[in-house]
Amino acid sequence: MAKEKVVILGGGGGGAILANLLPQDRFEVTVVDKSEYHVFLPGFLWVAFKGQPKEKFRRPIKSLLKPGVNFVHDEVVGVDLNERTVHLKGGGKLGYDYVVFATGAPLDFDAVPGHRELVERFGDFYSTLENAEKLHRTLASMREGRFVIAIADPIYKCPPGPHKGTFLSYELFKRLGVADKVKVVLAVPYPHVYSSKTIADVIEPELEARGIETHTFFTVDSIDLEKHKIYSLEGEELDFTVAAVVAPHTGPQYKVEPGNVKDDSGYIKIDKYTSQVVGFDDAYAIGDCTNAPTSKSGVTAHLQAEVVAKRLQGFDARYSGRTNCPLITDGKGLFVISDYDHPPIPVRLSGLKRFLEELFVATYWSAIKYPELWDPIFEAYFEASAPEVFLRYGGW
Amino acid sequence: MGEVIKVDAKGMACPGPISALTRAYRKAKNGDIIEIEATDPGFKPDVQAWVKRTGNELLELTEEGGVIRARIKVTAKRA
Ligand SMILES: Cc1cc2nc3c(=O)[nH]c(=O)nc-3n(C[C@H](O)[C@H](O)[C@H](O)COP(=O)(O)OP(=O)(O)OC[C@H]3O[C@@H](n4cnc5c(N)ncnc54)[C@H](O)[C@@H]3O)c2cc1C
């Protein structure tokens, strides 16, 4: 039997794992990525706030793919689902039996006036390793004033990311001996300091204890770099000395035929359980590029990759909507855990869970390349920490 | 006359409905009316707090059969 051709668009968190999970005696697998490097996005936090070298958080995609997986270094500029064709910037075309969208959620720095100038001046911790490096230089030279972290759209990758940045920047200023002169400020679009009230109730006292200033119902509308002010959609303004604003995210920027597989925000419309693109049984989408009503997280991308790998082999696998974002502060921390049927619940970090987070970073590259070795461990962890288990036993 | 912007946030858990409202508000102009329906019980106090903070006008807030419906007149957008 001829091998079935699977073309995976994007070699990030979701795409690379899927490529490595597909049995090569049955599938001919090709990964297309416009970047030569796979970037571990949570690394932006370590680079921006701990000054770690950016090289630690990126690897050539080719080195992460199993031998036998084809890698095409080119940009996807169009996908025609009716013609089963992927169009590449270099002029090439790829045909497929199955296509999987995994191109993530790029950031739009033109949506908010003044944002591009802000990032060029200070850097940020959501877009690139280079910008994270720049933010570190900016923060390390701050002696006084206000460092503001704000958000331009309520839907963004890893909901606790800005909060992690807030705690980590406070720790950085403490290490530098300027914590009493630099005010850390966090502004969020939600009614409470975190999108879910349950989680907000846990982190609010932690923020307060550190003297971190918080603002709710603050969605960034425009930025004036000269006046050092951020204006919110809700009609308020904030002064800053240095600011990092999480940019609005977008779906795939390339054209997809038929156009109606993208939703109003440009994300690929999928069945939230099977990851199948609506209306097509030979197209899937995983990770940040989909409209699945769950937080955009690496865990989601990983679990959806497993579901798609199983479905392509004929098994009826489904994704529960499980997410798992760790939020670490000095000595303390918590995991934000949820799925489609349960709102986010906080799980306070014991030493063990803190250890798991460290392990997560240390084993990331290996888990991408050899997912089959790590999946049993992740599965055991996910089962033990499923929201219904916590709700039943009231947490660990 | 302003436009009527309808937002269906039924089935979205917190803060889904408020996020949907925020996104609709970004596109709205003064004079528009945003009609939003949600089933998350937290939406009622949240939308009241939102209206108070933003200074827009709450025309109607009802709850029927588990569906919370708010009609908001957009009056406070910066020109
Ligand atoms: C600061 C920060 C902290 C985070 N922390 C956590 C965390 O603690 N836990 C967690 O679970 N998640 C976390 N996340 C989220 C997680 O990193 C993402 O959800 C995950 O990377 C999504 O994987 P993906 O494969 O969908 O997209 P990505 O990893 O973004 O990969 C997309 C790939 O597609 C490629 N691409 C894009 N467009 C094209 C094109 N047109 N043609 C070809 N290639 C293209 C890109 O180059 C990229 O390699 C964090 C994110 C950030 C920014």
Image (cartoon, coloured by chain):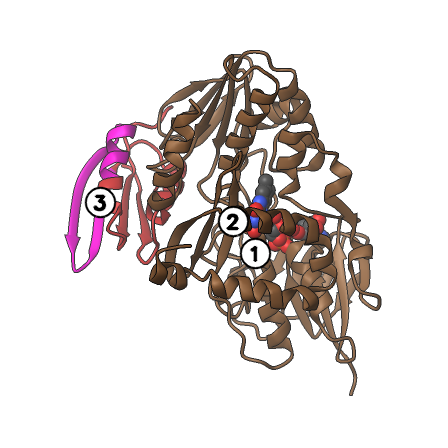
- CA gap between label 2 and label 1 equals 8 Å
Disc 2 packing (10 Å; few <14; some 14–19; many ≥20): many
Residue type, numbered disc 3: Lys
Q: Are marks 3 and 1 in contact (CB under 8 Å)?
A: no
B63 vs A202, nearest the viewer:
A202
Q: Spot the red chain and give its letter.
A: B
On the image, which quarter does residue A313 sit in? bottom right
Does the magenta segment cover residue A21? no
Q: Which residue is mark 3?
A: B44
Horizontally, is A241 left or right of A188 in the view?
A: right
Horizontally, is A386 left or right of A71 in the view?
A: left
From where the camera sits, is residue A107 visible? Answer: no
Q: Are marks 2 and 1 in contact (CB under 8 Å)?
A: yes
Can you tell me whether the CB of the residue at mark 2 lies under 8 Å from the nearest atom of ligand 1? Answer: yes
Q: Which numbered disc, 2 or 1, marks the residue that appears first in the sequence?
A: 1
- CA gap between label 3 and label 2 equals 28 Å
2 and 1 marks on the same chain = yes
Does the magenta segment cover residue B57? yes
Question: In what element is the residue under mark 1?
Answer: helix
A169 vs A161, nearest the viewer:
A169
Residue A341 percent coordinates (x, y): 37, 62
- Subunit of label 2: A
Q: Which residue is mark 1?
A: A299
Residue at x 78% of width, y 75% of height: A24
Residue type, numbered disc 1: Val
- Subunit of label 1: A
Eye-nearest disc, 3 or 1: 1
Q: Which residue is mark 2?
A: A325
- State the extent of the magenta-drawn residues as a range: B47-72
